[in-house]
Structures are given as C-alpha cells and as structure tokens.
Image: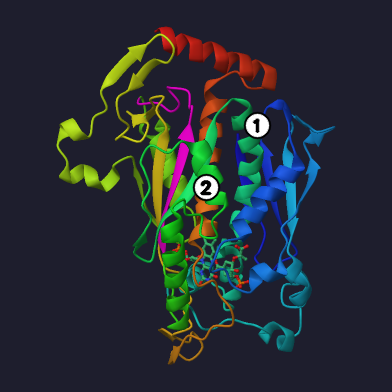
Amino acid sequence: MRFLTAGESHGKELTTIIDGFPAGVPIDIDQINHELKRRQGGYGRGGRMKIETDTVEITSGIRHGKTLGSPITCIVKNDDFKNWETVMGLFPVSDKEKAMRRVAKPRPGHADLVGGIKYQHNDLRNVLERSSARETTMRVAVAAICKQLLQALDIEVASHVLEIGGVKAEVSDALPAKQIAILAEQSSVRCVDVKSEERMKTKIDQTKKEGNTIGGIVEVVVDHVPMGLGSYTQWDAKLDGKIAQAIVSINAFKGVEFGVGFKASERLGSDVMDEIIWDDTQGYSRKSNHLGGFEGGMTNGMPIVVRGVMKPIPTLYKPLMSVNIDNKEPFKASVERSDSSAVPAACVIAEAMVIIEVAKAILDKFDSDSFEHLQTAVAEYREYTKNF
Ligand SMILES: Cc1cc2nc3c(=O)[nH]c(=O)nc-3n(C[C@H](O)[C@H](O)[C@H](O)COP(=O)(O)O)c2cc1C
Ligand SMILES: C=C(O[C@@H]1CC(C(=O)O)=C[C@@H](OP(=O)(O)O)[C@H]1O)C(=O)O
C-alpha cells in the first residue's frame, strides 16, 4: 500500500490517493469523519479550526460500503478557501493582486526561508501553504481507513499525551490500548491522567498569555500485533525504522523512542531485555516490554510502544527576529493567528502514522488482494507463531 497527499493549506481542497488497499474491506465513512474531528480538536488550537469542519468525500475505490481493491481517492474541502480565492487562484493575476498576502518575511522555525531559496519563490506563501500541518488532515484520512482494517484483524491502536511544556502525566506503563483510547478521548488534552490534564491546560493558558508556545511528548500503543512484521534482513526493511521516519515526518516532531527509549542508556541490560516465556493459551510472550515490542526491526508480539516529541509551535505572539527578503532589513515577526499548543492534535497524527506503517507491514507480509484471504492468512499465522 502507498499513498500521496496533495493540497495547499488555504487552497481549494486536500486530496489523497491510496493504492494497494485490499478489496472487500467494509468502510464506515462516519468513522473517517470522526478521526478527522479528533485531529481538529484539543486544547490550545487557534482560530483556523473554528472555520474548518473537516469532512471527507470519497470519489473512487469504494462501492456499496466496501473497498474495491482499486485506488481510493479522498477529498477534504478547505472552508477557509472562500476567504483566499484571489490569493490562491489558479490563473495569472495583476501585480496588485500578486502583492495581496505576499510573504516576504520568513518565520523562524518554519520552512519559509529555505523553501523560498530552494524553489526560487519570491513569495514565501508558495512554501508555507504546503509546509503547513494542514496537510496532515489527509494522513489522518488514510489512517482512518487503515484503522478499520486493523480493527477487523483485532489490532487495537491508541494514543495519549504524556507531557506538555514540561508538565508530565502520571501513567501506568501497562495500560492496554483499548483503555488508553477511552480515557484519552474524554480529555481535552488527550491525557489519561485527570490531575495532569488541569495542570497542562493551565500551562498552555499561561504560555499563551506570555506570547509564547510549548511542545510536548505523545505516545502511541498498538496491542495484539502479529509477530514478525518488518525484517532484520535489510536496513530499510526494519519496521521500527519505518515508524521512526513516519513520526519524525510530522510537522514539528523532533525525536522518537521505543519502549524505555533514551533511558536505555542509564539502565543495565537485565533491566532492558524482556525475558521470553511460553504458555498454552498465549504461546510466546515476554515478562516485560521494555523494548516496546521490537527486536531486530521486527514486531515481537508485545504491544508496540512508541513516543514522539513535538517542538513548541514556531509562530509566537512574542515576536522573534528575522530578515525581510526584499531589503535584507531585520524585523520582528508579527502573527495573525496561530495554535498556542497543538500537542493533542499532533497525538492523533502520530497515532495515524503508526497505524499506516503497521497496516503497510501487514499488507506486505500477508496475502492481501482480498480481505477474506488476508483474515485467513493472519489467523493461520497467529496459530503458527503460537505453536512454533
Ligand atoms: C497539528 C499541528 C498544528 C500546527 N499548528 C501550527 C500553527 O498554528 N502555527 C505554527 O507556526 N506552526 C504550527 N505547527 C508546526 C509547523 O507546521 C512546523 O513547525 C513547520 O511546518 C516547520 O516544520 P518542522 O518543525 O518539522 O521543521 C503545527 C504542527 C502540527 C503537527
Ligand atoms: C490548518 C491546520 O493547522 C494549521 C497549521 C499551521 C502550520 O503552520 O503548520 C498553521 C495554522 O494555519 P493558519 O495559518 O491557517 O491559521 C494552523 O491552523 C490544521 O491542522 O488543519
């Protein structure tokens, strides 16, 4: 399975085409819209999300509620486009119109300056329109379709926020994905620990008042993953490596870790390796899950536990210094609107990226032209791994 996304943040619409998805998978479109809504929410979002109500339109690849095995095309319209039709129009315009909302002042922490230099854009809007995290809408749409496939294979995925601006959630390591999903959904910051939720919100409010922004850490958990997704045999076949790339590809994500992650450096080997056990009902399992479900780039049957860190939103109300590309004069960056924290929304995007990589790995490994064949293949393989 592969997909591409297209669309500018204030353009007419966003599009994705998913290729290589099995035939015969029942797809509930309301569930896709539910996932899109989750991505739009979360405490700390700015004015743009009051304008948009992301709703998917599917124009190919699904008939009578089931996938056809042919490419699936999804479209989400930008409601804000009505305010940008001249600025974002397709056809040549006058110099006066060209100057409308032209961006000559690159924002630190954004793609503006380097993107403009690289693609020789005199109007940096040509960069920021595509580098915006608006694009992640389509990744969530793709993942919402993949999530329905994973759920039908009894694989559960959930995500939650572990930290915002240094305020840490107190969470037990062993929470199952199903429970995380329920608890996180009830929280405006996607935090399963109610006490920390209030402290996180206060931190977001305080930071916003000071004209500043904050980042955070999110965690994604996947339960009941078949063993042996990914491979140790080639560097680019390792599934943990693919997930790491997918997480860091999210706008503003700067790091990723699995299981105990960076804390592995301060632990003894006996506190990091997960001892192997076997019993009649479960087959092979581990006494612990310090390695977050991966050994040798392959899933080992334990839950996948992956975390990503998001930097603070780069656009600040407290202006940062930059240089005008027209006259090279320094200026203080000004802001019209921006999110003050998008960590809860980014959490949903991280979940989406993990879902996509796990779904791709499953479709790579098993007979997957037809959904029925896939279900049979996965069930047989689960039985095989148990009795190996
Ligand atoms: C869900 C989400 C919402 C975001 N909202 C904003 C925003 O309102 N303002 C802003 O300056 N950056 C925002 N960002 C971050 C920028 O898109 C990102 O930092 C920028 O494109 C540069 O990419 P990089 O940080 O990966 O280098 C958001 C990121 C995500 C994931
Ligand atoms: C539009 C979304 O997020 C946007 C991501 C974003 C950025 O610079 O990444 C900047 C803001 O956009 P605008 O400049 O239109 O206010 C956010 O609202 C979205 O998540 O759907």
Residue 65, horizontal then vertical, whole percent: 81, 33
Of labels 1 and 2, earlier in sequence is: 1
Would you say residue 310 sits in the magenta stretch? Answer: no
Q: Label 2: few (<14), some or many (≥20) within 10 Å?
A: some
Q: To which quarter of the image does residue 378 belong?
A: top right
Q: To which quarter of the image does residue 321 belong?
A: bottom left
Residue at x 56%, y 61% (from the top left corner): 42
Q: Amino acid at mark 1?
A: Gly
Horizontal side of 36 relative to 210 (left or right) equals right
Horizontal side of 131 relative to 149 (left or right) equals left
Q: Amino acid at mark 2?
A: Leu
Q: Which residue is mark 1?
A: 20
Residue at x 61%, y 68% (from the top left corner): 129
Residue 3, horizontal then vertical, whole percent: 62, 42
Q: Secondary structure at mark 2?
A: helix
Q: CA distance from mark 1 to mark 2?
A: 34 Å
Q: Which residue is mark 2?
A: 183
Nearest-to-viewer mark from 1 and 2: 2
- In the rendered view, tell whether residue 95 sits above or below residue 339: below
Would you say residue 229 sits in the magenta stretch? Answer: yes
Residue 69, horizontal then vertical, whole percent: 73, 29
Q: Quadrant of the N terminus?
A: top right
User: Would you say residue 370 is visible in this rendering?
Assistant: no
User: Would you say residue 245 is visible in this rendering?
Assistant: yes
Q: Label 1: few (<14), some or many (≥20) within 10 Å?
A: some
- Region in magenta: 215-232
| Mark number displayed over residue 304 | none
